[in-house]
Image (spheres, grey):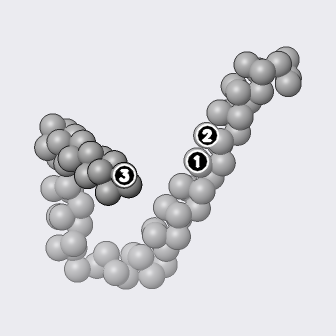
């Protein structure tokens, strides 16, 4: 039963990935790898850490707004 559901999900996701376009940012990201001074910039400005903090902040804001919408629907808040 679970293998059947997994096969259906795998087929659906592979079909979906074939339909959707590729990322428009892929060429820009690939060109960043060729920059020799990017490692030095990343030493002083930890870009990866900034992105992780930004993602966590954005996730918290999204969860807050989703919870407030649900709470309004079930009349917990006005």
- Which quadrant: the C terminus? top right
Q: CA distance from mark 2 to mark 3?
A: 35 Å
Q: Is residue 70 left or right of residue 52?
A: right
The residue drawn where x is 58% and y is 47% is: 58
Sequence order check, earlier mark of 1 and 3 = 3
Under tag 2, what secondary structure?
A: helix
Q: Nearer the viewer, mark 1 or mark 2?
A: 2
Above or below for 3 versus 42: above
Query: Residue 32: which numbered mark, if any?
Result: none
Q: Quadrant of residue 24?
A: top left
Where disc 3 sits, the SS reads loop
| Residue 71 visible in the picture | yes
Q: Residues within 10 Å of mark 2 (few under 14, many from 20)?
A: few
Q: Which residue is mark 2?
A: 62
Q: Position of residue 60 (x, y in %)?
A: 66, 48
Residue 17 in view: no
Q: Residue 38 appears at what percent x and percent y?
A: 31, 75
For residue 15, side relative to residue 77 (left or right): left
Viewer-closest of 57 and 44: 57
Q: Which residue is mark 1?
A: 58
Which badge, 2 or 3, comes first in the chain's sequence? 3
Mark number for residue 1?
Answer: 3
Give the distance between the C-alpha atoms of the residues marked 1 and 2, in whole angstroms: 6 Å
Image coordinates for residue 46, horizontal then vertical, percent: 49, 73
């Amino acid at each position: 039963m679970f293998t059947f559901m997994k096969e259906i999900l795998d087929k659906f996701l592979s079909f979906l990935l074939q339909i959707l376009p590729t990322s428009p940012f892929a060429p820009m990201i690939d060109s960043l790898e060729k920059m020799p001074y990017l490692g030095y910039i990343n030493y002083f400005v930890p870009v990866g850490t900034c992105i992780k903090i930004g993602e966590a902040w954005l996730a918290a804001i999204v969860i807050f707004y989703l919870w407030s919408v649900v709470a309004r629907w079930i009349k917990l808040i006005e």
